[in-house]
Image (cartoon, grey):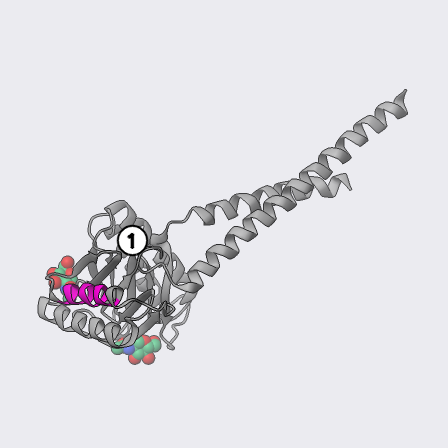
């Protein structure tokens, strides 16, 4: 019994430790969506090393800017890989680089051996592919999430419309605004021109207004831009989807459970240890 206990103790401590680490991850790292191309590449090929060097470039570059694009030329057209990252406009550079590093590592798992992939966390977006998408406006709807309808007063609905209208009428690739308890955020990927960005955002905002304005919060992600809003009492915009909230709840419950099990295990180990010590002392007398 005691020899197995000795094995289990480090395991329990490790579990408790890793659970606390995952709990401390900030909302910036919340997963929003991810997708991979159907096409796969052969491991060990030139394309694989080009993808790896591209992803490394993205992570390094995120320490110095909130957007950048890279192209790694292959010996053939098929081996060339394109990629970019875009951080949320209000992130500090340390948070931006942390977010991109996390997105890239998640992409590596999610899109193992895929020719292309894209991943959106709350704080950043990363995409790579072997067909060029840099500088190409793309309004394909990627993700729509509407919060639960909460029986809004006409006042609240007016504030939501006002926030969306302000987002649409503002300038620049990153827009943030609020009215009363309603906050709105909108952003384009940095490879769009000002007019393309405006066009993309107008679409996202209009769809958000038509399909999602009566809820506690709403999010509309198109391939190259997004718009979202949330009311007070919800989480910050974006990381506020139900699945994330459920995940957090599950993680918390798990942490408490593992903590309890570890505590009980520790007590058992101590009791068995001391009873053994006492037992040998008694036996020796
Ligand atoms: C991308 O890679 C796939 C698989 O290797 C290949 O079939 C396709 O032609 C490539 N696309 C381009 C534009 O090179
Ligand atoms: C890609 O990056 C280069 C160099 O940083 C820049 O000159 C170019 O405008 C970028 N292209 C796009 C489409 O963002």
Camera-side residue of 78 and 226: 226
Q: Quadrant of residue 138?
A: bottom left
From where the camera sits, is residue 138 visible?
Answer: no
Camera-side residue of 202 and 165: 165
Q: Is residue 25 left or right of residue 189?
A: right
Q: Is residue 20 left or right of residue 237?
A: right
In the image, residue 75 lies at what x, y percent? 25, 69
Location of the N terminus by quadrant is top right
Which residue, given by chain and number where applicable, does mark 1 sit on? Answer: 59
Looking at the rendered structure, the secondary structure element under dot 1 is helix
Q: Quadrant of residue 270?
A: top right
Q: Is residue 253 left or right of residue 40?
A: right
Relative vertical location of residue 127 with respect to residue 275 in this rendering, above or below: below
In the image, residue 65 lies at what x, y percent? 19, 51
Q: Which residues are magenta?
A: 157-168
Residue at (42% x, 64% y) in the render:
242
Secondary structure character of the magenta stretch overall: helix
From where the camera sits, is residue 120 visible?
Answer: yes
Location of the C terminus by quadrant is top right
Residue 165 colored in magenta in the image: yes
Residue 220 colored in magenta in the image: no
Residue at (32% x, 60% y) in the render:
238
Q: Is residue 164 left or right of residue 241?
A: left
In the image, residue 60 lies at what x, y percent? 27, 50
In the image, residue 28 lies at what x, y percent? 33, 53
| Label 1: how many Cα within 10 Å (few below 14, some 14–19, many 20+) | many
Number of on-image labels:
1
Relative vertical location of residue 239 with respect to residue 6 in this rendering, above or below: below
């Amino acid at each position: 019994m005691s020899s197995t206990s000795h094995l289990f103790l480090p395991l329990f401590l490790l579990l408790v430790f890793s659970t606390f680490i995952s709990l401390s991850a900030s909302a910036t790292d919340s997963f929003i969506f991810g997708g991979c191309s159907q096409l796969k590449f052969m491991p060990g090929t030139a394309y694989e090393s080009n993808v790896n060097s591209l992803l490394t470039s993205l992570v390094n570059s995120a320490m110095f800017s909130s957007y950048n694009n890279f192209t790694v030329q292959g010996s053939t057209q098929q081996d060339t890989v394109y990629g970019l990252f875009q951080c949320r406009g209000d992130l500090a550079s340390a948070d931006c680089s942390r977010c991109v590093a996390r997105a890239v590592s998640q992409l590596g798992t999610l899109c193992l051996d895929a020719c292309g992939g894209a991943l959106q966390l709350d704080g950043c977006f990363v995409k790579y592919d072997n067909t060029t998408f840099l500088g190409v406006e793309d309004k394909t709807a990627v993700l729509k999430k509407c919060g639960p309808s909460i029986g809004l007063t006409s006042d609240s609905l007016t504030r939501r419309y006002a926030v969306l209208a302000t987002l649409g009428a503002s300038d620049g690739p990153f827009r943030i605004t609020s009215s009363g308890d309603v906050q709105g955020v909108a952003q384009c990927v940095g490879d769009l021109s000002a007019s393309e960005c405006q066009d993309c955002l107008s679409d996202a905002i209009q769809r958000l207004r038509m399909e999602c304005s009566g809820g506690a919060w709403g999010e509309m992600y198109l391939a190259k831009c997004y718009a979202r809003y949330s009311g007070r009492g919800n989480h910050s915009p974006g990381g506020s989807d139900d699945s994330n909230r459920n995940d957090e709840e599950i993680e918390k419950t798990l942490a408490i459970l593992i903590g309890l099990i570890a505590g009980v295990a520790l007590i058992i180990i101590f009791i068995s240890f001391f009873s053994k010590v006492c037992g040998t002392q008694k036996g020796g007398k």
